[in-house]
C-alpha cells in the first residue's frame, strides 16, 4: 500500500511532475494551510509568517486546527510571534485576500460560527474549491474520517500521548540545533515515518477522504489533520494534504495555472501534484465486445 511522502523518486504520482529543485513561488492563486496549533509552544508561527510575507495568495484557506483551543484549556501560549502571525492573516484579509476558515477538531468550538462572514473572513464547515484549471476539490479538515480508520482506539490515544512527548523532544532538539546554526529539522516526522501503525492510519485516512470526494462526484480532496503532507492519486481522484505548522511547516499552493504544489516555509516547491489525473474508466462486462474507443481510451 503506497504511503504519502514528500518527493521520493519512485512515486509515479510525483516523479512525472517532479518540480525543479528549489523553484519557489511568489504570487499564488490559492494557499491552503492547516494545523497551525496557535496557543501551543509547538506552533512555528515565525516560519509561517515568513511564508505569508513571501507568497501573496488571492485566497487563503485555513483548513482547521488553526487555534488549539483544546491545548489552551490547560496552558495557553500566545507569544509575540504568534500574535504577529494573527495580525498578518488579518492584514491579508483586509488587503483583499479572501480568507476561508474551516475549523478542525482542536478549534471545533468555532464550528458554531459556521456560515458567518466577518469582513473578508468566512467561517465554513467545509468548502468546494474550483482550481484555475477547473478541478473541483472538497476542502475539509479531515477529522471526520477518523471513524473510518480501523485501528484500535487505545492505540490512537497512546499515539496522541506519544505525539505530545515527541513534539516536546522536537522543540528541545531544534533549540539545540538553532544554537549550532543548524536549520529546522523534524524529529517527530522522522519517527512517524518509521512507525507501521502511524503509516497504516495515514493510508486508511487518505482512502476515506478519496472515497468521500468520489462519492460527491468531485475531482479531489484537500485536507490536513494527520500532519503528513503529500499527494496521492487513486481511481481518478486526487488527494492533497497540506501538512502542518508544528512539525513539517508545509502548505499547499495553487499557482496561476491551477497547478498544485506542496511548498515549504520558504515558498520552495517540494512536490507537485500530477496535472492530469486519468478519469475513472468503467470496466466493460466480459461478455460485451470491447469497442476500439474503449480499448484505446
Ligand atoms: Mn486535527
Image: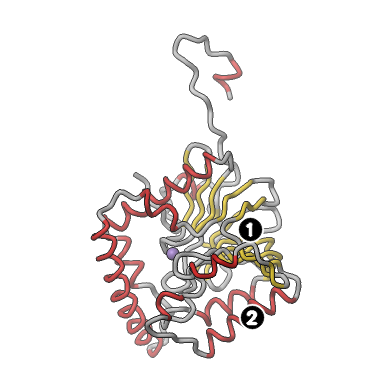
Identify the mark at residue 162; answer none if there is no mark.
none
Tell me, yes or no, if residue 271 can be seen here.
Answer: no
Q: Earlier in the sequence, mark 2 or mark 1?
A: 2
Rendered-image quarter of ligand 1: bottom left
Placement of the N terminus among the 4 image quadrants: top left
The reply to whether residue 123 is in sight is yes
Q: Secondary structure at mark 1?
A: strand
Residue 154 in picture, x, y percent from top left: 24, 60
Callout 1: few (<14), some (14-19), or many (20+) C-alpha neighbours within 10 Å?
A: many
Vertical placement of residue 275 versus 94, above or below: above
Which one is nearer the viewer's eye here, 121 or 137? 121
Q: Is label 2's Cβ within 8 Å of ligand 1? A: no
- Residue 17 on image: x %, y %: 55, 49
Residue 51, quarter of the rendered image: bottom right
Numbered label attached to residue 88: 2
Q: Residue furthest right?
A: 96
Name the side, left or right, on which 222 lies relative to 122. left
State the quadrant of the C terminus: top right
Q: Secondary structure at mark 2?
A: helix
Q: Which mark is residue 254?
A: 1
Amino acid at each position: 500500500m503506497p504511503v504519502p511522502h514528500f518527493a521520493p523518486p519512485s512515486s509515479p504520482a510525483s516523479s512525472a511532475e517532479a518540480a525543479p529543485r528549489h523553484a519557489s513561488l511568489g504570487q499564488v492563486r490559492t494557499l491552503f494551510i492547516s494545523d497551525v496549533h496557535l496557543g501551543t509552544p509547538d506552533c512555528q508561527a515565525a516560519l509561517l509568517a515568513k511564508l505569508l510575507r513571501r507568497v501573496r495568495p488571492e485566497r487563503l484557506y485555513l483548513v482547521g486546527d488553526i487555534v488549539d483551543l483544546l491545548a489552551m484549556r490547560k496552558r495557553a501560549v500566545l507569544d509575540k510571534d504568534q500574535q504577529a502571525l494573527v495580525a498578518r492573516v488579518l492584514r491579508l484579509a483586509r488587503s483583499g485576500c479572501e480568507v476561508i476558515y474551516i475549523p478542525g477538531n482542536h478549534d471545533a468550538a468555532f464550528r458554531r460560527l459556521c456560515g458567518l462572514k466577518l469582513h473578508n473572513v468566512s467561517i465554513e464547515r467545509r468548502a468546494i474549491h474550483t482550481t484555475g484549471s477547473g478541478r473541483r476539490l472538497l476542502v475539509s479538515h479531515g477529522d471526520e474520517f477518523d471513524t473510518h480508520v480501523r485501528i484500535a482506539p487505545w492505540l490512537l490515544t497512546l499515539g496522541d500521548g506519544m505525539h505530545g512527548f515527541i513534539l516536546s523532544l522536537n522543540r528541545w532538539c531544534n533549540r539545540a540545533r538553532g544554537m549550532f546554526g543548524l536549520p529546522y529539522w523534524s524529529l517527530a516526522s522522522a519517527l512517524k515515518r518509521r512507525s507501521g501503525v502511524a503509516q497504516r492510519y495515514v493510508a486508511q485516512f487518505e482512502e476515506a477522504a478519496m472515497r468521500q470526494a468520489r462519492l460527491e462526484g468531485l475531482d479531489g480532496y484537500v485536507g490536513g489533520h494527520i500532519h503528513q503532507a503529500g499527494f496521492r492519486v487513486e481511481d481518478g481522484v486526487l488527494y492533497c494534504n497540506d501538512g502542518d505548522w508544528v512539525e513539517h511547516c508545509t502548505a499547499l499552493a495553487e499557482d496561476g495555472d491551477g497547478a498544485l504544489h506542496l511548498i515549504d516555509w520558504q515558498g520552495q516547491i517540494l512536490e507537485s501534484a500530477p496535472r492530469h489525473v486519468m478519469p475513472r474508466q468503467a470496466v466493460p462486462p466480459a461478455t460485451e465486445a470491447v469497442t476500439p474507443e474503449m480499448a484505446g481510451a
